[in-house]
Amino acid sequence: MRTGIATVCLSGTLKEKMQACAIAGFDGIEIFEQDLVTSPLSPEDIRKMAADLGLGLDLYQPFRDFDGVTPDLLKANLKRAEAKFKLMARLGMDTILVCSNVATATIDDDQLRAEQLALLAALAGDHGVKVAYEALAWGKHVNDYEHAYRLVEAVDHPNLGTCLDSFHILSRDWDTAPIEDINADKIFFVQVADAPKLSMDVLSWSRHYRVFPGEGQFELAKFMGHVVRAGYTGPVSLEVFNDVFRQSDVERTAVDAMRSLIWLEEQSAKWLAGTSAETAAAGTSEQKAAGRRRYPMELATLPKVNEPAGFNFAEVKADDTAQLEKLLGQLGFEFEGRHRTKDVQLWTMGQARVIINEQAALHTEPAIAALGFDVDSPVIASARAQQLKAPVVSRKVQADEEVFQGISAPDSTEIFLCQGSPDGTAAWTQEFGEGLEHPRAAQTAVIDHVNLAQPWQHFDEAVLFYTSALALEPQPFAEVPSPSGLVRSQVMQASNGAVRLVLNLAPVQQASAPKTYQEHIAFAVDDLVATARSARERGLEFLQIPANYYEDLDARFDLEPGFLATLKELNLLYDRDANGEFLHFYTATVGSVFFEMVERRGNYDGYGAPNAPVRHAVQYDSLHRA
């Protein structure tokens, strides 16, 4: 699949954008007119630079408000078009995007539109230019891709074809199956963008909230599957208008964009394989042949990996570890000792493992630094992540020590892919020396979920990263009120709930520097009340929950008085749904880290979302009283 990206997706100058696209590995680019107009580079300079970088110049865009106009305006539009065609010759470009009219169309007549487009096609032919006509979702009279293609067919000129844009099609919920009926020779260009499902006018949605594939909720694999079946072989190019992307580091955004196309290519191949298998299974000889059909556009796939089987460990880095050690001990964790060659501690409770890392941690406040996940094959999972442009993380090891496959997440959290074991043990724990001499607690625990706060400019990137590299599924996002404003929360989860990552969009005032915002690790136990009582006996200071919360809790759930009194006594929070119950409590924050202990009863699958505003408010008050 030939990959492309529109320069409008990125921050910086045209020169910086082109360099970033080449570094990210794109085959070509679309030049957005404003980027050219504001550039000090001449068209000839840009043409040479593209050649030197190995970038194709695939599309010049946009040419607006051409069709459905009065004769005088048509004359002016043709003059404007000819100037652009001459400019394109200097750039060495041969395809221009023409959008359906949104502003100046005063005549709603398809015959007139076809006649005017025929004049444009003839003029383009004189200059060796192809015109890709696109139906904008908010076009005044043409807003449907099938309508745009009917006009292309009516004109029947070799220099006029259509552009298929996933946003303009999927935002209007148009059926994508008819794409397969379009003559592939008449599909001059394909643009893709994802987006969250929002209730707002399409123009504002398009201009501010598009995201890269895999970061939204559109069925892009299905869209691309129909494009491939139509026989299209040209560029698949990103056209994403997003306020955040246009303020973020240009090279990083370009890499994220490339990752999204690699992921989309794989997902489209899966969709095609799945639907082809269904067609072949239908039974007739023609259907079986259709199921085995090969298409002109070949889609590459990645090494296949299953979702993680669970958390292997969580790591907190700190200079002064005394408060962390005290807190873990109060929760009931056992100190297993120090690593034999590294300045690292291991603490465990059942199968929940926490590493305290003191290496290169001078003046570092406690913060979540790394997560380990159990996977079927760490080497294959790492190879997949690297093909998805994930930066590699390596750690020094001795000859007889476990070698972890590591990659870096968008927020700089290090992700280690570990060899899982059926009994939940980890061989690397044998590298730690003797711990404290005391009787082992019978408490069982696992890491239930980890909450990671994401810098505002990398939130969507993180969703795609965990989707594509770790095969986690994004759940519907939520917004949680806090004293600092609404906190956007996105759960990334394995299908069986064995791995749960909660990505929170960090408030801007807390995200100016990495790892200065609050995050937490949650541990699931069998009996939270007993765990809380034991922790209190060890001197744990719980996050203090207001009495008003328990009055409201009683009103909502009509709890048994003794149980309610226990919740209040131990500062426990409670939630219930049709599937079960959820009990949890929080510790105070150390550095930017706090811990949560939870108990899931029945088939409760949430996170106590109604209690999140309470936690935010108490932590806010505690921070401002400190």
Image: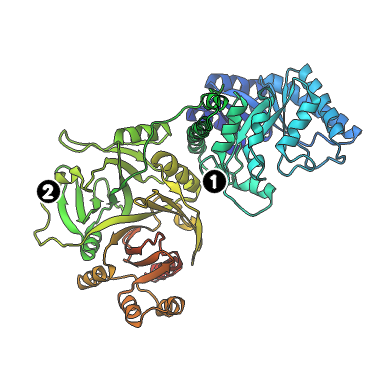
Q: Quadrant of residue 61?
A: top right
Location of residue 370 in the rendering, given as x and y in whole percent from the top left corner: 31, 47
In percent of the image, x 35 and y 63: which residue is there? 602
Q: CA distance from mark 2 to mark 1?
A: 46 Å
Is 397 rendered above or below residue 300? below
- Circle number at residue 216: 1
Residue underneath mark 2 = 433
Which residue ends up furthest to the left in the rendered image? 437
Nearer to us in this view, 368 or 572: 572
In the rendered image, the residue lying farthest to the bottom is: 561
* As drawn, 377 above or below 368: above
Mark 1, residues whose alpha carbon is within 10 Å: few (<14), some, or many (≥20)? many
| 473 with respect to 567 (left or right) | right
Residue 582: image location, x then y, percent: 37, 66
Give x and y (percent) for residue 42.
Answer: 66, 24
Q: Is residue 208 visible?
A: yes
Q: Tell which of 484 and 42 is nearer to you.
A: 484
Q: Sequence order check: which comes first, mark 2 or mark 1?
A: 1
Give the amino acid type for the residue marked by disc 1 in the picture.
Gly
Q: Is residue 120 visible?
A: no
Residue 527 placed where, x, y %? 26, 67
